[in-house]
Image (spheres, rainbow, N blue to C red):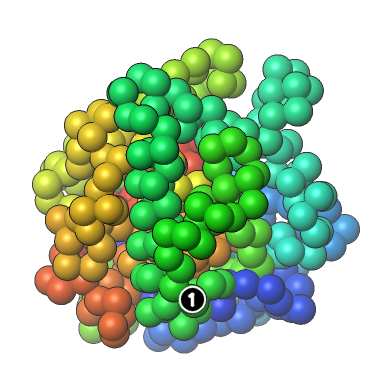
Amino acid sequence: MREVAVLGVSMTKFGVSEKTNLEMFTEAGLEAMSNSNIESKDVEALFFGNCLGDFEEGQMHMAPFAHAELGLPMSAPATRFESACATATVAIRHAALLVGAGVYDVVLAGGTERATKMGTPLATKTFAMATQSQHEARAGLTFPGVFAMAAHMYSSKYGVDLPELKKNMAEVAIKNHYHGTLNPKAHFQKEIDLDTVLDGMMVADPLQLFDCCPFSDGASALVLAEAGKAKDLVKKPIYVAGMGQASAGSLYLQQDVTRVKARETAVSQAYKEAGVGPDDIDVVELHDCFTIAEILALEGFGFYEFGKAHDAAAKRETYLNGKVVVNPSGGLKSKGHPIGATGAGQVTEIVEQLRGECGPRQVEGARIGLVDTLGGDLGTVCNIILRS
């Protein structure tokens, strides 16, 4: 396999947008190409992520339309990916694999989503379509319910009193909102405190409003290239050091939702390929769709022993300048969660961190970063490790 590098990256502001999915992705794609010092004619394939365009805008089969808006050559195939919330990360992984295999030299990858267009009831219903319909959706289970069960199970399994766990989960939200104030492209850019979280509306016991990430609109894109070509195009290419992707069945088969086994498998693949371990990671953008999800991820990566990460944010170990910096972008919780674009936004943040381009939220000396995106009912996890 050839070495693969990231050239240019781009992300629209996440939040509420009046632009269409195609308009947002075109904006991100053109900027990513410009930042890569390439032109549309140089792109040999498009790997395009979108989950719910049919519900959002009545528009399916978006990849070739995005291809045309970007002015890519007809010989460059455009392929749509859908892997629930892991959509863009999976698209990027496939793009990197084909560049590494020598099929393409330069490709464009990313995703777009306009989730707020649907409104909360329809968005909740369509997101829940990524659960297993026969056993989970039929029972009325939505993603807040899945992670509410995980919180209760975590409390019982590890002997952490639920009120203590709730306060520690709230500290995750407080930390990510603080980081979000430093990111001008974040959906939310306002600090919150413990009372704000604990006084919030109950969503799915014990998860309250500020334990949950928002529905967001946005797009993100990046250019991947064979490493030799990358050195001629940009001053500081960032290299794909390792990748992993794993799949698991429905929750009734997984049973213990405090252990995301697909994540443990995927990140092990990425660590092995990159030749690194948990102690080597300087910065991570992880899938904090709910506050308990960040705690589970920290343990799944091997950063903490199982049952020991619940107070990491409370101890400020995951803040800027902490033990390992987690979600300096604000994460899904504050930066936002346009599901088809989320993974590309995470990669964009890590690339910019490794280039030292993040201003007040810059992680000093960051050389190795980890991207973690979870899709569906813990059924898909994709991890990418990047290095400077």
Residue located at (65% from left, 44% from top): 203
- 219 horizontally vs 359: left or right: right
- 278 horizontally vs 255: left or right: left
Residue 193 shows in this picture: yes
Residue located at (21% from left, 71% from top): 363
Residue located at (25% from left, 29% from top): 306
How many labels, in total? 1
Pointer 1: what residue? 190
Give SS at disc 1. Answer: loop
Q: Quadrant of residue 353?
A: bottom left
Query: Where is residue 91 shown, x and y percent of the image?
Result: 52, 51
362 in relation to 134, above or below: below
Front residue of this view, candidates 108 and 282: 282
Front residue of this view, candidates 211 and 27: 211
**Quadrant where the C terminus is found in the figure:** bottom left
Q: Residues within 10 Å of mark 1 (few under 14, many from 20)?
A: some
Residue located at (12% from left, 47% from top): 279
Q: Quadrant of residue 59?
A: bottom right
164 in relation to 235, above or below: above
- Name which residue type carries label 1: Lys
Query: Where is residue 187 shown, x and y percent of the image?
Result: 56, 72
Query: Where is residue 24 shown, x and y percent of the image?
Result: 66, 75
Query: Where is residue 61 shown, x and y percent of the image?
Result: 77, 55
